[in-house]
Image: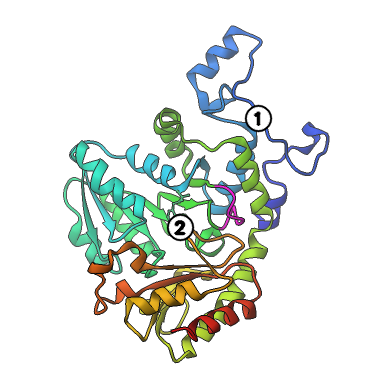
Amino acid sequence: MDLSYILNELGEDREHYFNAVAPPIMQTSNFSFKTVAALGKAFEDEMGGYLYSRGLNPTVDILRKKLAALDGTEDCLVFNNGAAAIFAAIFANIRSGDHIVSVKAPYTWVQRMFDVILPRFNVTVTYIDGTTIENWKAATKPNTSFYYLESPNSWDFALQPIEAVAAFAKEKGITTLIDNSYCSPLYQKPVEMGIDMVMQTATKYIGGHSDTLGGVLCGSHAMMKKIFDSEYLNIGSGIQPFNAWLLIRGLRTLPARIERITQTTAKVVAFMKQHPKVESILFPLDESFPQYALAKQQMKGACGLFTFVLKDPDRDSIVRFCESLQHIMMAVSWGGHESLVIPKCAGIRPADYDPSNKEHRYIRMYCGLEEADYLINDIKQSFNNI
Ligand SMILES: *Cc1c(COP(=O)(O)O)cnc(C)c1O
């Protein structure tokens, strides 16, 4: 299916809403029925039609169709945010006594779920360096039922050999879920590599304007129905029609934004690499990246995020660099129009900061839609302050 068709036409039914180019926001909580029989049918299978907007909603459905097509899957569920999508996908597929193998340092709230919530239900998690298939095999136990991948990771960009991990999981009957937020389906399609479920936060590139949250979960229809009938309806974390509408709007310009961000990031990365105050950078499609060959094989591109380390290991220098930026803002998240910076040390108590631990020195940068020179000049003047 053509990307342009997916983003501009798929799922839209314009003759049913006055040939309006933009779809309506179906801001309704409930849907009415003419017969008791029809209402009874909706109760029996809520995923088969419109009953109540905690379940399906027509505006959300336009988005679901587009996102499933982008990932190349049968179906999709859209949540109020990415964390909710991950929670539902995992919770629906584990039971007491199960064991999960996960990449180390997954997204913050995944780690929180694994460390705080799942132990209460007698589910254990082993964190591994997921860069080799051997490590996945070694960590797998007879009660392992779930693999959690995030490739690339959004801080150090560690990759997993997706095809090999998916193939081994299939052999063992283990369910696989990957966080594909870094690449987006434009740059990586994990289901084509054998992964069962793909998640991405729509808060980042799909929304694209830092004005809404959303979470995407794609997979087989059977899997999406299983999750819809339980966690999706029960937790009630489905996306609201207005936010779905904003994400449809974001999708229209996704390829143009990704293309622009990719070009800008390449320029900023090239500038950082030659700068005397920079010790090293981490960017999956840079030749210096430890898994460069695998990145080139699995990913069509890499866009706005990279991490760098200053030569000066002092926490004060990191603080001064971040606080001296005049245009690039300091904030969590990424994927919007605005460039951002975030130092790892912000999450480490000053007394615990260890300059000999390279990770403590990480500064992550996200390149948005500004002109590359505008960003480079801001970084330059900030370097002059350290
Ligand atoms: C932001 C983020 C999430 C969570 O998405 P929310 O929409 O903020 O809940 C998950 N994974 C990665 C890699 C993220 O950057």
Please name the residue shown 45% across and 58% down the image: 180
210 in the magenta segment:
yes
Identify the main secondary structure in magenta. loop
Residue 65 relative to residue 73: left or right:
right
Instruction: Decide: few, some or many residues near mark 1? Use Cα within 10 Å; few <14, some 14-19, many ≥20.
Output: few
Q: Residue furthest right?
A: 18
In space, the residues marked 1 and 2 are separated at their CA atoms by 30 Å
- Looking at the rendering, the stretch of residues picked out in magenta corresponds to 205-212
Q: Which three-letter amino acid code belongs to the residue tagged 2?
A: Asn
Percent across and percent down for residue 91 are: 33, 39
**Position of 266 relative to 182 (above/below):** below
Q: Which three-letter amino acid code belongs to the residue tagged 1?
A: Gln
Q: Report whether residue 300 is seen.
A: no
Of the image marks 1 and 2, the number of the one nearer the N terminus: 1
Residue under numbered circle 2: 180
Q: Quadrant of the C terminus?
A: bottom left
Q: Quadrant of the N terminus?
A: bottom right
Mark carried by residue 27: 1
* Residue 126 found in image quarter: bottom left
Please name the residue shown 23% across and 66% down the image: 134
Q: Identify the secondary structure beneath mark 2.
A: loop
